[in-house]
Structure formats: C-alpha cells, structure tokens
C-alpha cells in the first residue's frame, strides 16, 4: 500500500501514552497496520514512555512481592488468553476495524443520509462526544465544507478523495487537529469512497444547509 | 490539581549525562535479566527486585492518571501478578523491561476504565505492511544495545520544557488539552513540544545510524 498521508507525531505519542478513545485507537491501529513507517514511530514512542517510566517518583505500595506470590500460588492460573477465535476476513479492511464490523463492507446496513452519501454508525454514544462512523460516498460526491474544533481522524478504506490538503487514497490517514482550516472533500475515484471517521467533538459546517444536515450526517 | 507539579524524580541539573545514561543502561539490563529469569525458572528473588522497583511506579502512573489509592493499589497488584505470570513472553530483544511494564500497566488501565481492550495492530493481519521493516534503521533500534544508549542520551538532551510535557502526557494528563490547562499554555504549544521531542529522539537515532545506512536507499 502506497501510503502518502500519515499520522502526526502528537497523535502517535498520544496513542502510545494510552490517552485516545477506543474509536481514535481504531483509526490509528488501522493506519499503523498498513504503514510500517508510522508503526515504527509508535514503537519508538512506547520505548520513550518506557524510558521515562524509570524516572518516575514511585508511590507507596501497601502489598509486598512475597504476599503477592503467596496469593498467586493459591489462585488458579488462567490459561493464556486464546487468540480471538475467528479472524474476520473482509477484503481491504484492517483487523482493528474488521473486528468491529458485523458484516463485510458490501453487506453493512448502510443508512442513506443524502444523495450519494450513506452512513454506518459504529458508536452508540451521543454525537456531542464525537462521532465514530463509516461514510460511503459515491463517485463525484462533494461534501460540505467544514472545519473542526478538535481532533478528527479519517482513514480511507477504499477509493479516494481530494480536498485542500491533497488526494487521499486507501490506507492514508487525514490527521486534522483543531486548525481552523476549512476543507471540502471531493470523491475522485471510480469506485465508491469509503472512509472511517472519528471525531472528538462535532464539526463546524460553513453553510446554513450544512448546519441543517449536520444532525443527520452526525459529524 | 496537585498532580500538576509532578516532575521526573531525579533532578537533571548537574547530573552527568554519561553517568546517568550508564545507570539507566545498567538498570535496563538488570530488569531485563530479571524478567527472563522469572520467565525461565520462576525466580522469586528476581521478581522481588522487579516488584520493589516497578510496583511503586505502576501505582504512581495509575494515580497520576486519576485513580484513587484503593483502586490503584488493587490494579498494581494485578499488574505485578501479570508480570509474574507472563514473563515467559517477555523478549529482551524486542523491548526494555520498563517498556514492557509500562505497556502492561497502560493496557490494564484502559481495560479497567473502558471495559474493553486497547485496540492494537495485529501482527498476523494480512494487510500488515512489512515490506521495508528490515531496511528501516528505526526498526532495529529496540533490539540493539547501542540504540538503547542513543535513546537514553537523546532523552537526556531534551530541553526541560519538552521533557516535562512528555512526562505529563505519558503519566499524568488525560489529554494534551488537560496538560495545556495545567501548564496554562496554549494547546498548540503543548503539541509542538511533544512533536519536537519526538523528532529530536528520532533524528538522534537516525543520525548515529547514518554511517551504516548512508547508501541504503535501495534496501538490502
């Protein structure tokens, strides 16, 4: 996969620190799967965390090592966690996402939200806590121009789109972070464009019509 | 928030970088050997050494990230039990003991708070991009004592303001936004310090590798 758009260092560090939401983690893990360059950065960020861990001021611990071993001897040892039984094989979908899908992309229960735009919601949480969803965009679709208050991650599962930043293809990640820049993606692939999107807070749409649409699009 | 003032335990000023680096490397070796000994023959003395060094740090991490004493104590015991039972899977070639411990603690905290596991890359994913792993100088650093030394040195050299933000991000704050509030800085400043620190660490590893990888534009 010829990845052109990568995660920022800040997002990679946040992932290594364990500070992202489950939906953001999914997006990051999808990109790390298809991009060894970012995967190595993430590994480095974990090693930095490990090195700094040695410098921490320890807290007072009540229990002792020998108490713990005595307790351990009396507790049944769970067998090593078996790897998740079935590994979903959805073509073109990295496992961190595939494990959260009930069916292959073609068989999802897509909800039509606008001409040429279908949505599959991956999160039941209220929109104000941020969205986590797949968007299915027909070729030629132009999304409303919008900007973001906070972090938004987009992972391209298939197809491509172009916006003010550049062209995004499968495997690319758009790591937008609270800059005021407005962007307006245009789908420019022959096949439908499928994007996985996670936001931390709702998106600001520029036009009045878009503001009306926002509750339906949910981003 | 009183955790705001949490700072790295050791005062950097006046410390001799090379001595500090050497002490870090000696510790890394000792703890790595300990984990191997636990994994191979359930070495209780080795476990006692790991426990006495890391249990307080694990608990400090959990409390720093917002857990109360009671829950942090309980999770610390669980995490140390995991260390005892899973040391067999520790590979000193892949990571320092401290990194292994840190990731176990980080993941257990996420499990506890969310009720589901941290989402990670699966190395047997058919989509895994492995093409250039072997030719990438960054890929080998963890398995290499020389690179471990470079990492320690690079961290020693970070400006205090970058080190502070990194420390807070790994062990104290819930988010970069929270750190910005604590330090009364714009969030952009926090993020740029993190970015600069990551870049500094990375370039120090790459530059010291340059001589070996100068003509590696085409991978071997």
Image (tube, rainbow, N blue to C red):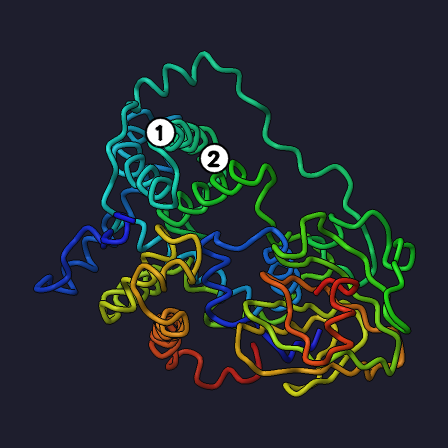
Rendered view: B77 above or below A162: above
Give the mark nearer the N terminus: 2 vs 1.
1
Q: Chain of mark 2?
A: B
Q: Position of residue B151 (x, y in %)?
A: 32, 64
Between A208 and B139, which is closer to the camera in this rendering?
A: A208
Residue farthest toward the left in the current orientation of the protein: B14
Rendered view: A57 above or below B130: above
Residue under the point 51% across and 36% down: B112
Rendered view: A82 above or below B6: above
Q: Position of residue B207 (x, y in %)?
A: 36, 79
Mark 1 element type: helix
Residue under the point 75% across and 62% down: A215
Residue marked by disc 2: B88
Rendered view: A5 above or below B76: below
B214 with respect to B59 (left or right): right
- Spatial CA distance of label 2 from label 1 is 24 Å
Q: Tag on residue B73?
A: 1
Residue under the point 40% across and 69% down: B187
Q: Give the number of marks.
A: 2
Q: Residues within 10 Å of mark 1 (few under 14, many from 20)?
A: many
Q: Position of residue A44 (x, y in %)?
A: 44, 62
Mark 2 element type: helix
């Amino acid at each position: 996969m010829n990845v052109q758009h990568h995660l920022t260092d800040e997002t990679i560090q946040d992932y290594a620190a364990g500070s992202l939401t489950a939906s953001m983690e999914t997006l990051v893990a999808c990109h790390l799967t298809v991009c060894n360059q970012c995967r190595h950065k993430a590994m480095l960020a974990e090693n930095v965390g490990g090195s700094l861990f040695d410098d921490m001021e320890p807290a007072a611990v009540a229990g002792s090592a020998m108490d713990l071993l005595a307790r351990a001897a009396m507790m049944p040892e769970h067998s090593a966690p078996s790897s998740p039984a079935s590994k979903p094989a959805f073509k073109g979908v990295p496992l961190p996402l595939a494990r959260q899908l009930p069916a292959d992309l073609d068989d999802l229960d897509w909800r039509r939200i606008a001409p040429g735009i279908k949505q599959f919601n991956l999160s039941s949480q209220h929109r104000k806590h941020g969205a986590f969803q797949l968007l299915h965009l027909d070729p030629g679709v132009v999304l409303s121009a919008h900007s973001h208050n906070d972090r938004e991650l987009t992972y391209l599962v298939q197809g491509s789109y172009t916006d003010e930043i550049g062209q995004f293809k499968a495997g690319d990640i758009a790591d937008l972070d609270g800059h005021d820049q407005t962007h307006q993606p245009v789908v420019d692939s022959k096949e439908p464009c499928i994007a996985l999107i996670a936001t931390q807070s709702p998106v600001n749409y520029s036009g009045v019509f878009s503001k009306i649409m926002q509750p339906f699009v949910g981003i | 928030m009183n955790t705001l003032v949490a700072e790295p335990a050791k005062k950097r000023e006046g410390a001799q970088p090379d001595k500090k680096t050497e002490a870090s490397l000696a510790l890394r070796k000792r703890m790595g050997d300990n984990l191997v000994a636990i994994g191979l023959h359930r070495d209780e003395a080795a476990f006692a050494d790991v426990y006495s060094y890391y249990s307080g740090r694990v608990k400090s991490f959990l409390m720093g990230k917002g857990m109360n004493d009671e829950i942090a104590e309980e999770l610390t015991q669980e995490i140390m039990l995991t260390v005892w039972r899973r040391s067999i899977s520790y590979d000193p070639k892949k990571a320092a003991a401290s990194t292994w411990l840190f990731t176990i603690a980080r993941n257990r905290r996420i499990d506890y708070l969310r009720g589901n596991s941290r989402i990670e890359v699966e190395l047997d994913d058919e989509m895994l991009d492995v093409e250039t792993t072997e030719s990438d100088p960054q890929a080998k650093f963890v398995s290499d004592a020389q690179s471990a030394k470079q990492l320690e040195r690079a961290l020693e050299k970070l400006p205090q303001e970058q080190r502070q933000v990194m420390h807070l991000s790994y062990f104290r704050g819930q988010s970069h936004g929270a750190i910005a509030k604590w330090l009364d800085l714009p969030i952009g400043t926090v993020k740029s310090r993190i970015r600069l620190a990551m870049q500094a660490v990375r370039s120090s590893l790459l530059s010291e590798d340059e001589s070996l990888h100068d003509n590696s534009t085409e991978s071997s």
